[in-house]
Amino acid sequence: MPSADGVKCVVWDLDGTLWDGVALERADGGLPEVRPDMLAAVDTLAGHGVLSSIASRSAPEVLERVTRDPRLASRFLAPQISWQDKSQALRAIAADLGVAVGSLLLVDDSPYERAEVEALLPGARTAAPQDVPALLDALTGRPVTPEARARAGLYRTEEARRRAGERFEGGREEFLRWCGMRMEAGAAGGAELPRALELAERTHRLNSSGLDRERVRVLVERGGHRLFTARMTDRFGDYGIIGMALVRPGAAEWSVPLLALSCRIAGRGASVAFLRWLMEQARSAGADTFALDLRPTEANTELRLLCRQAGLRAGTDGGGPAPSTVTLSRTLHGDLPPWPAWLQVRPLPIGTTHDR
């Protein structure tokens, strides 16, 4: 059984996996009876913040049957049912959900299909149906945040945003204004620590240094570092806590060993707004310089561009977990990065936290 670490979505085969038999062979045009143990596994995964999708090599009419079945349509996101290879289906699912292919795990009864995915999608994991109980056992005892429990609903809300954007008659900035996006930033309370650690572990596209969750926990508990978080809402609903920053405040310089934001808010201005807000806090505290530890990876190109736009430039080796980590810094005198015009930013009053 492969490791469950880093799995964001379990992708289920249908025939011989989610149910016994073959859907296309049914004369009544219905679906075979879904195995109760597999549905229970999907629900258990959802309770731990792990999404579920479908990849099945079958006729498109089966997809129509699945999407009409309320039990299945409510449980599975971005289903792919066609005659394409499973590796192509997993690529499409990853793109639709905005996650890395390496965060997917395919459950399939066919050794051939599992081998095809492993060969063509390095990083993606596979398992046989009989491995599912071990997968669930591996999740037992792990802390679950409110954002994790609501993750499937958050992705459905994101799909509603996407559809609204496609119908919107106007430019991208006009659409973002229409969404009424609001961000609340402030010091993290104790109840927010699990979500902050989850962001440190799960995010890759908008993760500055890859500092692992246990190191973050130790630094917070030891003292000398502060933890800040950001929450977002819009007309479609609550994104939850979407950003965290571990900060080492000093009299002359505020240093950020880790900045991590949810990939769900990419392209909406929240990243630059949170970074600008942190710089303002540093300047208000009397610091002259703002510094950020960055470990460049293939995944975090977007964040590196953001740092450059924010005026952060490479200086010395950083204090991060790898030799390739560098420190980007800038003076806090003069103009800071501009606020996104469509995003309202509300700072929390001093002494309060999101979990007040």
Image (cartoon, rainbow, N blue to C red):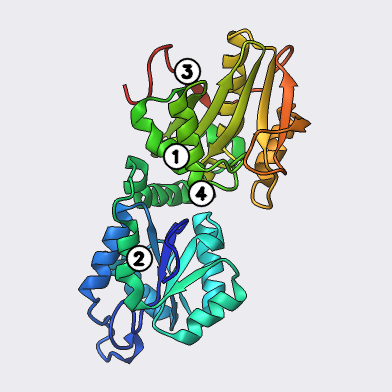
Looking at the picture, how far across and down is residue 79, in whole percent? 42, 68
Per the model, the C-alpha gap separating discs 1 and 4 is 36 Å
The residue beneath circle 1 is 197
In terms of depth relative to the viewer, which is nearer, 100 or 226? 226
The answer to whether residue 216 of the structure is visible from this angle is yes
Comparing labels 3 and 1, the label whose residue is closer to the camera: 1
Instruction: Name the disc covering residue 167, or none.
Output: 4
- Which circle's residue, 2 or 3, is located before the other in the chain? 2
The residue beneath circle 2 is 135
Say what amino acid the circle numbered 1 marks: Leu
Per the model, the C-alpha gap separating discs 3 and 4 is 32 Å
Comparing labels 1 and 4, the label whose residue is closer to the camera: 1
Tag 3 near tag 1, CB within 8 Å: no
- Which circle's residue, 2 or 1, is located before the other in the chain? 2
In the image, what residue occupies the spot 45% across and 39% down? 197
The quadrant the C terminus occupies is: top left
The quadrant the N terminus occupies is: bottom left
- Which circle's residue, 3 or 1, is located before the other in the chain? 1
Comparing labels 2 and 3, the label whose residue is closer to the camera: 2
Say what amino acid the circle numbered 2 marks: Leu
Comparing labels 3 and 4, the label whose residue is closer to the camera: 3
- Density class for disc 3 (Cα within 10 Å; few <14, some 14-19, many ≥20) is few
The answer to whether residue 277 of the structure is visible from this angle is no
Say what amino acid the circle numbered 4 marks: Arg
The residue beneath circle 3 is 347
Per the model, the C-alpha gap separating discs 3 and 1 is 22 Å
In terms of depth relative to the viewer, which is nearer, 340 or 326? 326
Say what amino acid the circle numbered 3 marks: Pro
Relative to 61, residue 259 above or below: above
Q: Mark 4 falls on what kind of element?
A: helix
Tag 1 near tag 4, CB within 8 Å: no
